[in-house]
Amino acid sequence: MIRIGCIADDFTGGSDVAAALRRTGLDVALLFDVPEVGTELPRCDAVVIALKTRTVPRTEAVRQSMDALAWLVTKEVEKVYFKYCSTFDSTDDGNIGPVADAMLRSLQETSTVMCPASPEHGRTMYRGHLFVHDQLLSESSMRHHPLTPMTDSDIVAVLGRQTQGAVGLLALPAVRDGVDATRRALEELATVGVRHVVTDAIDDSDLRVIAEATAGLRLLTGGAGLAGALGSLIASEAGTAAPGTSLPDGAAVVLAGSCSAATLAQVARAAEVMPAYRLDPSATPDPGQMRREATNWLVEHLDRGPVLVYSSAGPEDRERARTAMGPDTADHLERTLGDLARTAVDQGARRVVVAGGETSGAVVQALGVRSVMVDREADRGVPWCLTGDGVALLLKSGNFGSEDLLVRAAGGTA
């Protein structure tokens, strides 16, 4: 029996929560997209299904999530975890509330917790407000996110605009009073009809309390922080996972599409030490021509050591790109990066490093990868994923990782 079955709303979110579970000593399988009927799993304690539902229409997000949940139910999972970003990437028209509602109905549960906090990454919750380090979410760089601009840090309010179910707050004082007090507070909220309980948490000990207090809930939701706390509770029963394996030999390619501040700094560092090619729609507005020129460059440079291809850019460059290529610019860039990943692997690349959730989805789909085993982390929350055909993938969320991550992961010299 699988102890934890997770459904993540994007591919890097899937690798993030898989890393959190693997870190506790659990064996973790990571699957991309809804598994087909009859899909067999290797022996594992936890399975993560990574979807691309964060920014699709609500009805489609619910449909895919329900299909994934139905598959997990056939595997008799003990606990279901709906994983979304620790910055709650979801506007008023977003999918977190509707997907959580549908999961509760399917599992015949009446309530769940909503806990995006990930203290190790500087994401904390206090009085229902989400902080990024010492800034309110609404004052952080996430307010400029091109797909999910977060302009309200009050998660109770944001969620309340997404769902017709009652939303309540489990405030920090109750959590700090311990497991029994937290459990009582959750029961009291459920008694008055609260369906979604937004939970405060500012350090890992708070997450541990919440994980223990919610032992009776079939469904939990949140970031990788609470999932890791949950995993640590069952790790001693499941045993210790095998140590990490060696990464495959072969060429390395870095593909970056995220425009987060962290990724922009990582791209700048990587471009200093390896051949780099920028996808620039303002210079090459025809998508076909852009793809051909980038492919030619990649084939010419791939055998010279790690190489970088990126579309990551600041707000002004992104606006110029949209003006030149049109409203589908982001889709064209993602498809191009996915095609380049396929070309690189066909040319012998065995290490593919990807920055950005949408880009990771495009790359995984272009490569036809359906499942991987999760290995050691290159940085906190950024694990290597090993495919069955000898390719190592590193799927990095835009905001994650140290400045030299792309260089180290590709095997370059910092």
Image (cartoon, grey):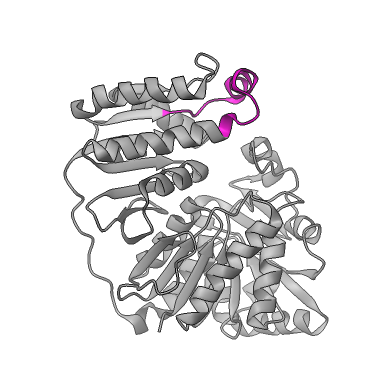
Residue 276 left/right relative to 137 = left
Asked if residue 395 can be seen in this view, the reply is yes
Question: Residue at left 70%, top 80%?
Answer: 186
**Residue 277 versus residue 20 in the image, above or below:** above
Residue closest to the eye, 405 or 13 = 13
Which percent across, then down, holds residue 120?
49, 55
Residue at (58%, 53%) from the top-left corner?
A: 123
Residue 398 visible, this angle: no
Residue 393, how many percent across, how many down?
33, 48
Q: Identify which residue is drawn at 38% across, 19% down.
A: 293
Q: In the figure, is residue 102 to the left or right of 339?
A: right
User: What type of secondary structure mainly makes up the magenta span?
Assistant: helix
Where, quadrant-wise, is the C terminus in this rendering?
top left
Which contiguous range is marked in magenta? 310-330
Q: Nearer the viewer, residue 305 or 346?
A: 346
The one of 259 and 47 positioned closer to us in this rendering: 47
